[in-house]
Amino acid sequence: MVQQDAPSKRRRRYPLSLNILTIFLLLMIAVAGSITWYNYRTSSDRAMMASRRLMHDIVGQFTGQLTEFFSKARSFVVLSAEHPGIKHPPVDEGHSLEGLFIKALASHPQFFGIYLGYDDGHFFQVVRLGQLAPKAREDIKAPPGAMYGVRSIIQNPGGPRIVTWRFLDEQKRQLSAWSLSAPAYDPRGRPWYKLAQEAGRVYGTNYYVFDSLREPGMTLAYRFAPAPKGGVLGVDVSARTLCEFTASHKVGDSGLTVVFDSQRRLVAYPQAKQIVKVARQDGKEVLGLATLDNLGNPLLGELSRLFDPQAKEQLLNFEVKGREYAAGVERIKDFQGQWNYVAVLTPLDELMGPIIQSNLRSLLISLLIMLASVPLVVIIARRISRPLGQVVAETKAMRNLQLEPTPAIDSHISEIHRLTQSVATMKTTLRTFSRYVPVDLVRQLVFSGKEQGLGGEKRVLTLMFSDVANFTDMAEHMDPEALMLKASAYFSGLCEEIQANQGTIDKFIGDAIMAFWNAPLADAEHAAHACRAALLCRRHSQQMDQAWQEAGQPIMHTRLGLHTGEVIVGNVGAAQRMDYTALGAAVNLASRLEGLNKVYGTQILASQAVRRAAGEGFVWRTVDQVEPKGTSEPTLIYELVGLLGDLPELAPDPAALEYCDRWEAAFALYRERDWPGAAQAFAALAGERPSDQAAQVLARRTAAFAADPPPPDWDGSAVYDSK
């Protein structure tokens, strides 16, 4: 029977649902209902009024931009025509107005080219090359880095027309030039030249596409002296700046501003090159301006359908792809008195400006309602948000296995109180559980959210066994508590190095550690990580031994065995009690290699499979070819000497590297069955380093083989029948 909390001793708990309903019912009905009703009644009309004002402002700004756009060009044309040198035709070296034209191009980004055509056929032109299409640059042979192109066409009386191109960089230095004598461009037959037949007035062509720019624009022409001894000054004015204006002046994020003429041809559009249409006539490419109908934009297509060219101003509403749009269209005149149209299109849902005043009034009403509800909201919100936020932080920390103890969470709400108690219990359980099984496995279980059962999978792992030399003798002579503290410090240091290099601690077997790599999390460099961990464990063990020795305590000399091979890894045991571990012959071989350290006096022995999988950077010494107990296949074993690279403390000194080189040369003689040579080489190594037990073993063996060679069918393996 569950004992009930005594009311006098326990704080009252309230259901979470009651608190949430109280907040939402009171606030949503009172505040949201009032605001929604008020905005519904006022937002539509105000949005349309505001959109009309915004659109009219943009049209006014564009009209001013257009006036400034052409006034600069007209002023330049008229003033340049007064220059005394304009009446003189060009010569081979250029024209006296060349510098003036270059300055004008540099200071007026809307100018593309400036040119002079004379009644006698002479022609002079300065063009900006930076915006020129690649093919156009190639056609005139403009070199890289050229900023301006200067063309002169000289009409020799009774002779050929001479065309000269000169190319200048940004500092007006000539980069290259070329000339040819051939039929060439004659300005007298061009539309802009024919247009300007009456002096004292600036004429303008209709908008068209510049072939070399592939952008829209128009040409202004002005006759600077009457025929037949005068000529025409022309300026190509690009509509790019007008297009940039439409891109930057729009209503809302999805709004669109365009300019078109009475034939519905687009003159200015945010992307200038998109309104250029390419057609082919008689096998030639013909460029033209897109219209509202053929650009492919459904907004402009619907605008074209509703547009009235006779109306001075229109405000249109239409729907495209389920979205409501408003469009304001106004008629404007250019400097020649031609009608153009500016259209500003925007989605109705982005017209927030018109409802600002309505929102302010609604905000005042909502504020009065909210003020009456503030005390209740504050009290209930604190009761809910504070403990829930703490619970969320706790669960996030648990998911990341950050399981350190934290202060208890308390709440007046019964559900939250029970939830915090459950979270605290779960955190304690996970913290305890993670000390008994690999942390990566615990993390994998937490993230998967699935119940684990018995079973495993085949996987190639790198396995490590460690052992402490003479641990039994040390344990017999030490106080149990002191031994436990010493062993715990020893295991903590080695386990930290193993886990820092992505290793998984499988189990502790007395004074031994079993660890492996590449499970439960995959590790493509598991052999290299295992070797690094082994070297760091050796270094850590040596540091502890030095400290213990200086303190007069027994040392814990560590021996390690490494092997890479296929095993079964997974959950082994019974349904009630499982152990995540690895099973297989590879596990046994790793254990046997650790034991063989006693035979050869080494600290780290590894199989040939480990050496192959570990990659570059490690320093090895070939120790022997063996058949450990429980194995039937011979394997080469190696001593892991050190690591060359990012950890200088693990790198062997030059003397050790030189010793390893001589050792490998001696072992090569051994493998070649050169017993006298091998015996002499190993005897020298053993004499040089009497403490090298491996050298002593092979020196004795090769000396015996030199006296009594093994049979020809001997495979070179040392067979061991004990662990």
Image (tube, rainbow, N blue to C red):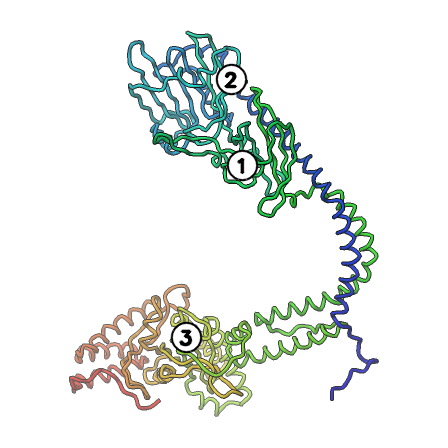
In front of the other: 589 or 329? 329
- Tell me the CA gap for discs 1 and 3: 65 Å
Q: Which labelled disc corresponds to residue 534?
A: 3
Query: Residue 452, image x and y in percent?
Result: 51, 80
Name the kind of residue labelled 3 in the image. Ala
Q: Is residue 597 visible?
A: no
Q: Which quadrant of the structure image shows residue 21?
A: bottom right
Few, some or many C-alpha atoms within 10 Å of disc 2 (few <14, some 14-19, many ≥20)?
A: many
Query: Residue 353, image x and y in percent?
Result: 69, 41
Query: Residue 564, image x and y in percent?
Result: 36, 76
Whether tag 1 and tag 3 are in contact, CB under 8 A, the answer is: no
- First of labels 2, 1 by sequence position: 2
In front of the other: 704 or 318? 318
Name the kind of residue labelled 1 in the image. Pro
Q: Label 1: which residue?
A: 270
Q: Is residue 614 depicted above or below 180 in this figure?
A: below
Q: Secondary structure at mark 3?
A: helix
- First of labels 1, 3 by sequence position: 1
- Tell me the CA gap for discs 2 and 1: 27 Å
Q: Label 2: which residue?
A: 203
Q: Which residue: 64% across, 70% down? A: 394
- Tell me the CA gap for discs 3 and 2: 88 Å
Q: Is residue 407 visible?
A: yes
Question: Residue pushed farthest bottom?
Answer: 476
Q: Secondary structure at mark 1?
A: loop
